[in-house]
Amino acid sequence: MRKAIATSAFSVALLACLATGYPLSSVHAATATQTPPSGQLVTPNRYGLPDFGDLVDQVGPAVVNISVVKQQAAVDGGLSPDDPFYEFLRRFGVPVPGMPGMPGRGPRISRGIGSGFIVSPDGYVLTNAHVVGDSSSEVTVRLTDRREFKAKVVGIDRRTDIAVLKIDATGLPVVRTGNAEDARVGEWVVAVGSPFGFDNTVTAGIISAKARRLPDENYVPFLQTDVAINPGNSGGPLFNLNGEVIGINSQIYSRSGGFMGISFAIPIDVALSVRDQIIKFGRVQRGKLGVTIQGMDRELAQSFGLSEPTGALVANVEPGSAADKAGLRAGDVVLAVDGVKAAESGDLPRLIGEKRPGTTVKLEIWRDGKSRTVTATLDEMSPETVAEAAPAQGGEDTGGKLGLGGRALTGEEASQLGVRGGVVVERVAGPAAEAGLQPGDVVLAVNNQAITSVDHFRKLLERAGNRFALLVQRGTSRLFVPVKIG
């Protein structure tokens, strides 16, 4: 028993040494008072663990609670006389909105809570777009000293989930902003916010990963943390140990609706860029290249002669777009923008979106087995649409070694897609099925060579060898599908 207790005590002391980065040569150093690195507000306590008290005292006053009330339009509502429940309830004398003499439903009121932080002494506040909803919402900002202000929604950018608010006040406490790029995976961070409406709640954790890509989120390289974030924390700041905001807490991964150890924050540099544009222009202006892209995997990289899967593969070029005018074409791989590497496909929308419309950029691309540089003058971001392929009917064997059956595009279908020809997939087997081809896909090219007819498709396959890429139209999207025979 005595030996076990001694071992346990040593383990605790050793853990304290590891937690604070003290040398292992002196176990007693774990309980000593240490001077924090320059600029840091956090010092180890007598147990060797970080004490966030000074940091919270300094940054807390600039963190605000945000409450939102939205009144939706009134509806005459009630049940329709054609609804079977209408007659049932009427027979039993149950009053139903919509019956003669009964008032309809009134306006529907929705309420929400969130967090935010003050970024200027004259009252500019940052939070999430999903916290405030839209400009018709009634937004109230409450400070830690219990003062409340009606806030004006200056602007919202839903692509980055950032909203800028303005309250009528001066001399307000403000946060200091840091640089998310300098943050390191594994370092301590602190979140302050209003989870479930509990003002100025403090939680701490570490940065778990950087530059995380989330589905349908192309403009934000999220910081992933294990800081406890719950409903109401959205829009609140994420601080480093210097008391600087490096992110805005925005999303959580959850199966229950509560915290599960994975939280995501918008890097502060993204938020500040959005803020500056909203204040100056009233909206965010983003550059647009005019391409549809897909990610690169090892199979695709080998098909295009790249030594590693990097860059963004161009699957489609919008006619008349900046990319079209610059000479980009399907099958090009964009490796860098103005010298900044696009390590993965998700980097390209952000690198282009950060540029203002009208900006001329240099694109490093990979084409025909070698690198080259092209210049493009960016358009302004706008919705894009692509014509749908018609459903497949009938068919013939076209695949041979590929294991694909289909038919040629009709002239009308080819015109709708803006191509000379293609093959509509109707059945798949073997390598085609393994590659993920599906009935209804339209194969437009083999190794970036456009298909003009079924016979041409067969000849291209014969020359392609055992490893190649097919350009495929699937619904409204185009993508390259790597195929490996044998």
Image (cartoon, helix red, strand yellow):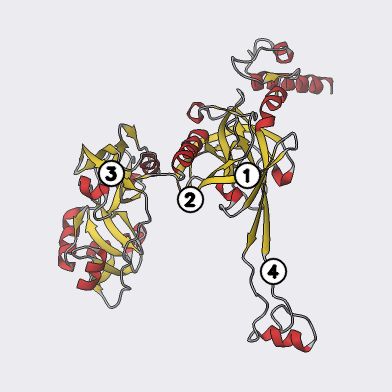
SS class, disc 3: strand
Mark 2 residue crowding within 10 angstroms, few (<14) / some (14–19) / many (20+):
few
Above/below status of 79 relative to 333: below
Dot 4 and dot 1 residues touching (CB under 8 Å): no
Q: Secondary structure at mark 2?
A: loop
Residue of label 2: 215
Q: Nearer the viewer, residue 405 or 178?
A: 178
Q: Is residue 354 visible?
A: yes
Tell which tag, 4 or 3, sits nearer the viewer: 4
Dot 3 amino acid type: Val
Residue pointed to by mark 4: 106
Q: Quadrant of the N terminus?
A: top right
Name the front one of labels 4 and 2.
4
- Residue 469 or residue 432, whichever sits in front: 469
Q: Quadrant of residue 356?
A: top left
Residue flagged by tag 1: what amino acid is it? Answer: Ala
| Rendering coords of residue 360 (x, y %) | 27, 38
Based on the displayed image, in which of its 4 quarters is residue 136 positioned? bottom right
In percent of width and height, residue 37 lies at 60, 15
Q: Marks 2/1: CA distance?
A: 31 Å
Residue 61: mark in rendering: none
- Give the mark nearer the N terminus: 1 vs 3: 1
- Packing grade of label 3 (10 A; few <14, some 14-19, many >=20) is many
Q: Could you say where residue 237 lies in the image, as x and y percent from the top left?
A: 61, 35
Marked residue nearer the N-terminal end (4 or 1): 4
Marks 2/3 in contact by CB < 8 Å: the verdict is no
Instruction: Look at 52% across and 46% down and name the residue there.
Output: 155
Q: Secondary structure at mark 1?
A: strand
Q: Is residue 261 above or below residue 388?
A: above
Disc on res. 151 = 1
Precedes in sequence: disc 2 or disc 1: 1
